[in-house]
Amino acid sequence: MDTTAIELIDAQGVSFRELNNRIRQALARGVSSVRLANVNGQRYICCGFSVDRPVEVEIRGIPGNDLAAFMNAPITIRVRGNAQDGVANTMNDGKILIHGNAGDVLGYSMRGGRLFIRGNAGYRVGIHVKAYKDRAATIVVGGTAQDFFGEYMAGGVMAILGLGRKEGEPIIGNFLATGMHGGKIYIREHIDPRILGKEVSIFELDDSDWAELKALIDEFAADFSEDLSALKKEEFIKLEPVSARPYGRLYAY
Amino acid sequence: MKLYETPPEFRVKIDKDLCTRCKRCNMQCGFGVLSYDAKEDKIVADHHKCVACHRCMVYCPQSAITIERNTHAYQDSGAWPVYLRERVYKQAATGGVLLTGMGNAAQYESIFDHLVLDACQVTNPSIDPLREPMELRTFLGSKPSSLQFETEKGEYALKTEVPPQIRLETPIMFSPMSLGAISLPVQKSLAMAAEMSGTYMNTGEGGLHKDLYPYARNIIVQVASGRFGVYDEYLKAAAGIEIKIGQGAKPGIGGHLPGEKVDDQVAATRMIPPGTDALSPAPHHDIYSIEDLRQLIFALKEAVEYSKPISVKIAAVHNVAAIACGIARAGADIIYIDGFRGSTGAAPTIIRDNVGIPIEIAIAVVDERLRREGLRNSVSLIAAGSIRSSADAAKAIALGADAVAIGTAALIAVGCRVCMKCYTGNCSWGITSQRPELYRRIDPREGAVRLANLLRAWGHEIKEILGAVGVNSIESLRGSRERLRGVGLDRETLDIIGVKPAGVGY
């Protein structure tokens, strides 16, 4: 088994089912890296994949919806372009690096692994992301994100860096963290509390938060080969839920 | 003692002459009704807490306990039934949403009770199932529109690739009930009984406990809006995967498993930290359309490499026929429809009792619409939501279901008294409680035998029905509404369900 080999796959005109089969076969042969060229909207790439060793998948082109859905493996997927909706849906383990922008419903119910987006993200990012034991879903958006960021968030860490914005462009949309009942969100801007869900409050970062955030920025910068050290001197805010039982008093027993 | 606004619903009477003060009843009650008063040397009851679950009565060695409805006079009012007045008192005191468990308790008439089955007389012979083979085996999954065969060395072989199927030895499954809603020993009973009977249990949205993995071949796992406990091994272990969109007891409503029910065991299975609320959002936030549903169906098919059928569970609502067709076109292999009498571990009372439509009507309109659109063979239909007997099961199948699922009936088989207090976590029978001292009361093996007995009995009864109807397989009754007649149903309802009134021949 040659574990250093690189497999090249031309995805031009290949159906998603066939494409996944070819990636699976390559990984079964023991290759350490798979490079997909001419990806043009194929859905479900690496969906439900599980391998027991670290491997890399590089995507050139635009992967379709549900990239790395249900993935539970130490796979690093690097997308050299934009991604569509549903990236890392219910992902348990793995790392997704998107050099461009990504669409809506990213990281839905993710329980572990990392999702880094260098550009902007769409609506409903990080809904119901979780943490469990040694796993914690981590999502970092380099640019901006739209409404419902972190809705129902139950655990893990999300950060939004607001890089490359136009003058006056908001860092985040409305209904931020509605129903959040676990985890943390870091935002590189003071926000109007009116956009927040009523279950969360704005806090200052303590020392351990700063350590966590700085490590995250360093990792993000290294993954995209950039120098973002200036970010570490900027002001961030932290969102945390006020209660792990937001609806505890809603019912009459 | 707490001041209550209304008189107790039930009274616990203890016969002082029979009572030996053994205090077993104190231990048996999960709701803390009974205690021993040492000064008076007697068992005393806090009647307000009693839910009439019978646990103390059944376990009193002297049969000294009786539970009675506490009849108390209210001024009569046609407009204001007592239960509505008492709800207002409770809500005025608490400001809370009323919670309940089990299925719809409102006074709607059952359509099953107005349907009768046919039987053979003289001109066509009935069949004796005790002496002749009778087929209950059912396959759930998408069926091809046509079959092609090939010959090899004179032998015929199937050429058409048939999509994955789930094989049932009896057309009755267990409905989805999560760990959290019910206890682990009850889930084990269901899993063992499913294995013994050749049918399936369903995890609900609560993950698959590690103790249940050995039974995974008889387990369908759910993927719901909170995605609790969903990970690759869970998907790969199961016989089938079900996307839960809705539930008959609470269509359109999410789930809140309160933090106090999330102990280490529930937390590990759902893969969340202990003590936190497990919130299932009302919709899947990645599904806002049939196209989105198709995306999740195929994500799951990809994840398991097309090796098992994907089911979609919905509640029976007004537009159920059109929705079901959308689900079929989205690529589902099975549609599970839960009628408005379907049960729940916890739901707002007002939703449980007022939202959705009866399963009898939903089966008929979905079956009809799928046939009309040429989709019926592409999906199997599971009907649930008040299948209370083998007769209900047979009628549901005659109306067009491929199989039925039972939840409440299964829980009654392991001791449930339908006290509707599942949401409190105090179930004295240990069925819906996560308190170890209570759930240890269920012996999984004994529960499994009781459940398998129930399925065996209902299976025999269905065979008797088939024999009387004059057919020798459940396949021949399926969707055969000509073998049903309505008694006391209005013309419009009969038209909608495609059944003739009693008195009309073929």
Image (cartoon, coloured by chain):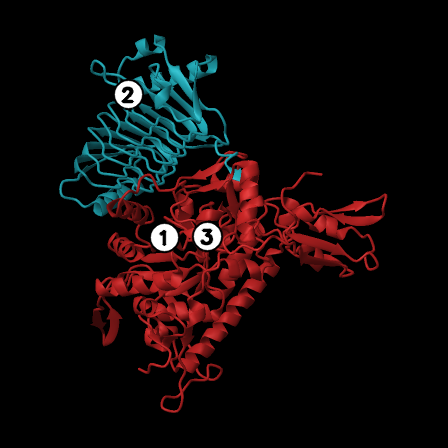
Q: Is residue B155 visible?
A: yes
| Mark closest to the chain's N terminus, 1 or 3 | 1
Residues at discs 1 and 3 in contact (Cβ within 8 Å): no
The residue that mark 3 highlights is: B353
At mark 1, the secondary structure is: strand
Amino acid under label 1? Answer: Ile
Q: Quadrant of the N terminus of chain B?
A: top right
Instruction: From the rendered image, report the letter of the chain displayed in cyan.
Output: A
Report x, y in % for residue B111: 42, 66
Q: What is the residue that sits farthest to the left in this orientation?
A: A13
> Mark on residue B314?
1
- Estimate the spatial distance between the alpha carbons at disc 2 and disc 1, rounded to whole Å: 38 Å
At mark 3, the secondary structure is: helix
Q: Residue at x 48, y 36 (%)?
A: B272
At mark 2, the secondary structure is: loop
- Label 3 marks a residue whose chain is B
